């Protein structure tokens, strides 16, 4: 089985604050009502309920998970839903009011129909939820358990790994199949392709070249819109912490310094870009999983860094087309991200923050190395450097909110990604520790890591910082 995951699965447009705790549950609830509708049984339903287990139950309120479930039951999908339709969908629900399942069939619904069971952990995955529909007599019409496995991907109990996906390209047969970084490099060497070129060939097996380009451009446009929105926003983020937004103030300071004739370091902007995205994510705004929401600021920040400060310095003509360069960046990152998802994890609830921020940092480092003219070996080296120095990173959000330490962590990781790329570009691609060894180490570390440090807010900063 190939590790490759489509760019349009790995980079999905959705809403904040969490891909596994918001986007995945929304997608699962929508999948549940869609199945009822396809089976012709939606009209039998008089009541629905959802139980959130493990990590989904532990930090569900802070991540807006019940809100996402209600939005999904109403028929919304992450790619197109108005963020305002998700915010408060459960928390502000008037008990007993009719809920339109799939947007068409009304049932009485109360907030108590969504329950949290943080102490019950299903063995298949820490992010589990069971959706049940009953008829007027109280007989179960349908009941399904779903696992939100990271990055907005879901898996239905009983489907196995083949069921994982966001619903568009899951189960695709790729012309270029690889299960490890070593196989990827060997395949690229044999076919005389760059990593991005090989990823592009896989994407073009599903859709025309023009659609691949347009789709990647749409992902980049959504990323840039998120950056710009975050750079212009002010005020405080939702939740009991009342975290102050900083990206807008940083933008104003940097613009003022530039207007005065000073040359601000690109690294200052790099941090502002990352903060902007993750502040938008924390507010429940439109964001692109990259590969998760908690780590969504790293790839856009590094790509924007290249777009604004490095692209013009490239001498090769093909690099002067910024759009073309961004497609190469995203496709390279896709191939690398696929390895983490297949051979370790991109889920903070499963592997800690090393699985989210570490994976995103490695993907960004590889993408930047590619657009800076690096070889495949240098790209693999950059990804290895970036991931190696995130091993063991815990996921311990204060108050269960994707704010502290998540927002600053993205800015730091963006800087690490740039450093990793520059170190790799100064070498010839030969290095002692392989990317495969680091991916396996990350997997083992995630298995050994206490569940307290995997997004449950039961350890680390989450218990050593006063919330209010």
Image: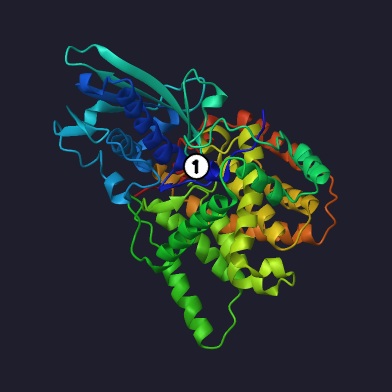
Across and down, in percent, residue 165 comes to: 51, 33
Q: Which residue is mark 1?
A: 396
Disc 1 element: loop
- Residue at horizontal 66 percent and vertical 70 percent from the top: 320
Q: Residues within 10 Å of mark 1 (few under 14, many from 20)?
A: many
Q: Relative to 8, is 285 above or below?
A: below
Q: How is the image coloured?
A: rainbow
- Residue at horizontal 78 percent and vertical 43 percent from the top: 185
Q: Quadrant of residue 243?
A: bottom left
- Residue at horizontal 70 percent and vertical 74 percent from the top: 313
Q: Is residue 405 visible?
A: no
- The number of numbered badges drawn on the structure is 1
Q: Indicate the quadrant containing the N terminus: top left, top right, bottom left or bottom right.
A: top right
Asked whether 423 or 145 is in front, the reply is 145
Q: Quadrant of residue 53?
A: top left
Q: Relative to 89, is 106 above or below?
A: above
Across and down, in percent, residue 156 comes to: 46, 24
């Amino acid at each position: 089985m190939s590790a490759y995951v489509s760019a349009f699965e790995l980079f999905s447009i959705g809403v904040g604050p969490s891909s596994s705790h918001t986007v995945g549950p929304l997608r699962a609830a929508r999948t549940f009502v869609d199945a009822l509708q396809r089976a012709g049984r939606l009209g039998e339903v008089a009541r629905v309920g959802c139980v959130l287990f493990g990590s989904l139950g532990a930090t569900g309120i802070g991540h807006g998970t019940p809100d996402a479930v209600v939005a999904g039951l109403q028929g919304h999908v992450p790619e197109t839903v108005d963020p305002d339709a998700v915010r408060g969908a459960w928390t502000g629900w008037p008990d007993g009011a009719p809920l339109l399942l799939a947007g068409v069939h009304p049932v009485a619904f109360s907030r108590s129909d969504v329950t949290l069971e943080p102490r019950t952990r299903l063995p298949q995955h820490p992010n589990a939820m069971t959706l049940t529909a009953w008829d007027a007599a109280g007989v179960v019409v349908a009941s399904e358990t779903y696992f939100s496995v990271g990055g907005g991907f879901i898996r239905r109990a009983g489907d196995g790994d083949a069921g994982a996906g966001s619903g568009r390209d899951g189960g695709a047969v790729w012309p270029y199949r690889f299960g490890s970084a070593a196989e990827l490099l060997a395949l690229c060497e044999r076919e005389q392709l760059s990593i991005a070129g090989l990823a592009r060939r896989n994407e073009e097996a599903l859709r025309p070249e023009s659609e691949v380009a347009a789709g990647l451009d749409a992902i980049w446009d959504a990323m840039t819109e998120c950056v710009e929105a975050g750079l212009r926003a002010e005020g405080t983020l939702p939740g009991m912490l009342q975290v102050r937004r900083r990206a807008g103030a940083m933008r104003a300071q940097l613009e003022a310094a530039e207007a005065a004739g000073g040359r601000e370091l690109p690294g200052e902007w790099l941090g502002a870009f990352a903060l902007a995205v993750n502040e938008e994510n924390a507010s429940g705004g439109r964001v692109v999983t990259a590969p998760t929401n908690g780590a969504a600021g790293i790839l856009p920040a590094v790509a924007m860094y290249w777009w604004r400060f490095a692209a013009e310095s490239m001498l090769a003509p093909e690099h002067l087309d910024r759009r073309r360069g961004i497609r190469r960046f995203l496709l390279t990152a896709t191939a690398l991200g696929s390895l983490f998802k297949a051979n370790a994890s991109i889920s903070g609830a499963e592997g800690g923050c090393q699985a989210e921020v570490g994976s995103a940092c490695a993907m960004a480092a590889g993408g930047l190395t590619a657009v800076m003219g690096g070889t495949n070996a240098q790209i693999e080296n950059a990804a290895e450097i970036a991931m190696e120095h995130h091993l063991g990173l815990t996921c311990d959000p204060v108050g269960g909110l994707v704010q502290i330490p998540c927002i600053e962590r993205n800015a730091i990781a963006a800087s690490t990604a740039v450093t990793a790329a520059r170190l790799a570009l100064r070498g010839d691609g030969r290095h002692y520790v392989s990317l495969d060894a680091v991916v396996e180490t990350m997997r083992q570390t995630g298995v050994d890591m206490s569940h307290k440090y995997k997004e449950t807010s039961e350890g680390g900063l989450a218990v050593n910082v006063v919330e209010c």
